[in-house]
Image (cartoon, rainbow, N blue to C red):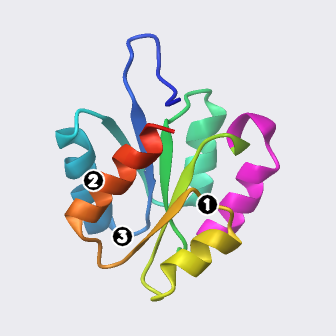
Amino acid sequence: MAETDGAGTRRVLIVDNDEHVREAISVVVSDMGLEPVAVAGGREALAWLARGKRPALILLDLNMPGMSGWDFRAAQEHDDALARIPVVVLTARGDATAQGHRLRAAGAIEKPIELDQLRQTVMEHLAS
């Protein structure tokens, strides 16, 4: 079940160091009637989560400077309150599915992102 705030808003946390990718995904998520929250890296995502708000889904780039998606995912899994939030990994490496399995992610999307696949994947994982 997707987590919501008191007003019923379903948030999607977008973690990607590329500003253009964050903006594009935010537009798609918003057009789906969801609330996008976009941050530039793993540390910023953890800081946002530490404020107590919970997204229904996290879209996580793996290759970021500072704290990579791999490092973020390790920190997330070590926090019981955060571990339950489903994650879909985003990667340009060409082996998105394998990367997702290694990280025990709910799903994976290969970059460049196809918007129909993004919409479908977000809806699929919000429903679980």
| Vertical order, 59 against 99 (above or below) | above
Q: Secondary structure at mark 3?
A: loop
Magenta stretch, residue numbers: 69-82
Specify whether 79 is left or right of 124. Answer: right
User: Which residue bears the numbered disc 3?
Assistant: 18
Residue 22, position as x, y percentages in the image:
32, 59
Residue at point 30% right, 54% down? 120
Q: Secondary structure at mark 1?
A: loop
- Residue 63 in view: no
Which sits in the foreground, 59 or 18? 59
- Identity of the residue furthest to the top in this view: 6
Specify few, some or many for label 1: CA neighbours under 10 Å numbering under 14, 14-19, or 20 or more.
some
| Vertical order, 33 against 73 (above or below) | above
- Residue 41 in view: yes
Q: Secondary structure at mark 2?
A: helix
Mark 3–mark 2 distance (CA, rounded to whole Å): 19 Å
Residue 95, position as x, y percentages in the image:
51, 86
